[in-house]
Amino acid sequence: MFFTYILYSILLDTYYVGSTSNLDERIKKHNTNHKGFTGKAPDWHIKWSQVFDTKKEAGRRERQIKAWKSRKMIEQLIGTK
């Protein structure tokens, strides 16, 4: 199983879109102090995820959501607006 997911940080008031094969471990990594974008805040939590059979499908969905470049569309997807 592979996942496409959306995280949210209250501190940064922003969303992060990604994909992985191990969602629990990936969220733990996002919440550690590291060099990447999500390393700027320790409060990332999952707002939405979708399961796929292949890495390719999950990556395709991740790229689709990122291509929106729209907070409004992400919030419609996750059901907050």
Image (cartoon, rainbow, N blue to C red):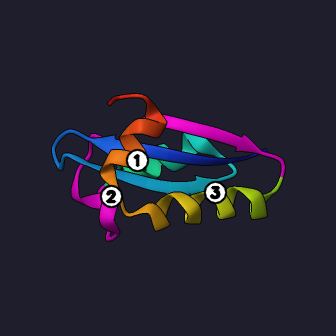
- In this rendering, is residue 39 above or below 74? below
Res 61 label: 3
Q: In which image quadrant can residue 54 be found?
A: bottom right
Q: Nearer the viewer, mark 1 or mark 3?
A: 1
Q: Name the residue under label 2.
A: 38
For the C terminus, the quadrant is top left
Q: Is-magenta flag for residue 16?
A: no
Q: Is residue 62 visible?
A: yes
- In this rendering, is residue 36 above or below 71? below
Amino acid type, residue under disc 1 in the picture: Met
Foreground of the two, 70 or 13: 70
Stretch of the chain drawn in magenta: 33-53
Farthest residue to the left: give it.
11
Q: Residue 45 appears at what percent x and percent y?
A: 38, 36
Farthest residue to the right: give it.
53
C-alpha distance separating marks 1 and 3:
14 Å
Q: Residue sitting at 22 percent across and 59 percent down? A: 40
Q: Residue 30 appears at what percent x and percent y?
A: 40, 52
